[in-house]
Amino acid sequence: MSKSNKLKILNDPIYGFITIPNEGIFDLIAHKYFQRLRRISQMGLSYLVYPGAHHTRFHHALGCMHLMKKAVNVLRFKEVAISEDEENALLQAILLHDIGHGPFSHAMEHSLVEEVSHEEISLLFMENLNAEFNQSLTLAIKIFKGEYHRKFLNQLISSQLDMDRTDYLKRDSFYTGVAEGNINSERIITMLNVVNDEFVVEEKGIYSVEKFLVARRLMYWQVYLHKTSLVAEQLLIRVLKRAKELCASGITVEASKAFSFFLNNKITSSDFNEDVLDIFSRLDDVDILSAMKEWMYHDDFVLSNLSQMIIERDLLKIEISDQVQQDQAKKPHIDYLIDTYNISAYEAGYFVFSGEISNQAYTAIDQNINIYYKNGEVKDVTEASDQFNLRSLSNKITKYYLCYPKRK
């Protein structure tokens, strides 16, 4: 058989042509662990609100890699020394930074497994791939974990102005059609520089950074924390919780082999061995959707109704307020469910619940976005900006919600 060409060019709707830079990167992209990301939605159930939001973690990872390549070229042009090995490690790390996401991304992050973040699972995947690819990801893992001596390399992967955020804001804005999130990633990257081993933005780029932070705030309220998306994701969490409860009590709950494993076993970080990782790698959105389509007809009232709500997009009502939702606000809705459907107060609690959401576009004490002036001065963006509202973006805004069923 003839050897296939691994230096491919991919067509991306955001950036145009994306070139796969070397055969090692191609082999990572071609690996089954990475290909799974084609079946993991980038924005969970947001497509129930924004019909175009069907893009995947696969799209996002390739976009991040493309932006990282551009950032490296810009910094080298400005005489920041970045070796070939460091560049390749950066591309590997940013490509794999989200590989640990489970089905529907953040929506099910702490539901399938107990208190294990997607970053931890990403690291497990990276270590597994490192062993498979003859330790060629060792430097990438070191940078990803923040253990490499050059701090700015980690900041390009994980900070308040990293390639991850720079891609997902622009990409999510495009696919949802929400123009407020459209940032100038090209301009931001062109203005990057490194001072005292930390990356900075040159003063000419301050307005692009301001736009980036405002766009992030608007995207959270308008898209990521949209009330309908919020309800759908909370229902998804409760579907999984109920399915696990039924399994624990010996009731049959049909699901794929991989999904059944997590329904029937409590998995924590200490349990996450290579066998569990392999089972996790076989899970994607399809497992969850196909299971819920079956669960719509399950004998259990809670599981069947929650599943039907999501599949048929007949969701709960939601009220959002600046005030904490008091327990007495739930009582009439719980009483209605108990009287109408003859279920217990505990079961009714699956359909009537409250919680909180928060939005903080910028954290001034956590890996600041620094603006670099020609005279060598470096200032935090909130100090450098003449935009008064920018300072308020570092304030955490919390809102409270109450969900309950519609009356028939």
Image (cartoon, grey):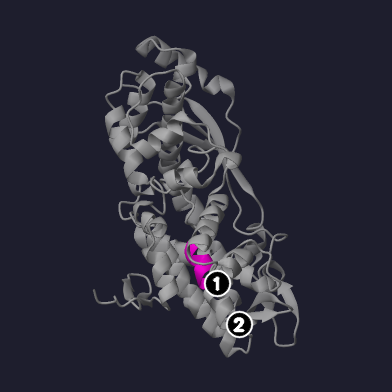
Check the image and report above or below for 90 versus 325.
below
Tell me the crowding category of disc 2: few under 14, some 14 to 19, or many 20 or more residues within 10 angstroms, Cα based. Answer: some
Q: Quadrant of the C terminus?
A: top left
Residue 161 seen anywhere in this rendered image of the structure: no
* Local secondary structure at mark 2: loop
Closer to us: 396 or 8: 8
Q: Residue furthest front?
A: 1
Q: Which mark is residue 90?
A: 1
Check the image and report above or below for 331 versus 161.
above
**CB contact under 8 Å: marks 1 and 2:** yes
Residue 214 location, quadrant: bottom right
Q: Residue furthest left?
A: 1
Please state the horizontal and vertical placement of residue 316, each as a whole percent of the image.
Answer: 39, 31
Q: Earlier in the sequence, mark 1 or mark 2?
A: 2
Please state the horizontal and vertical placement of residue 76, each as a whole percent of the image.
Answer: 58, 86
Q: Which mark is residue 82?
A: 2
Q: Which mark is residue 118?
A: none
Q: Is residue 268 left or right of residue 45?
A: right
Closer to us: 48 or 18: 18
Q: Is residue 328 left or right of residue 172?
A: right
* Local secondary structure at mark 1: helix
> Residue at the spot x=46%, y=52% of the render?
222
Residue 342 seen anywhere in this rendered image of the structure: yes
- The range drawn in magenta is 90-96
Q: Is residue 267 left or right of residue 1?
A: right
Residue type beneath disc 1: Leu
Residue type beneath disc 2: Ile
Check the image and report above or below for 29 versus 286.
below
> Residue at the spot x=66%, y=64% of the render?
146
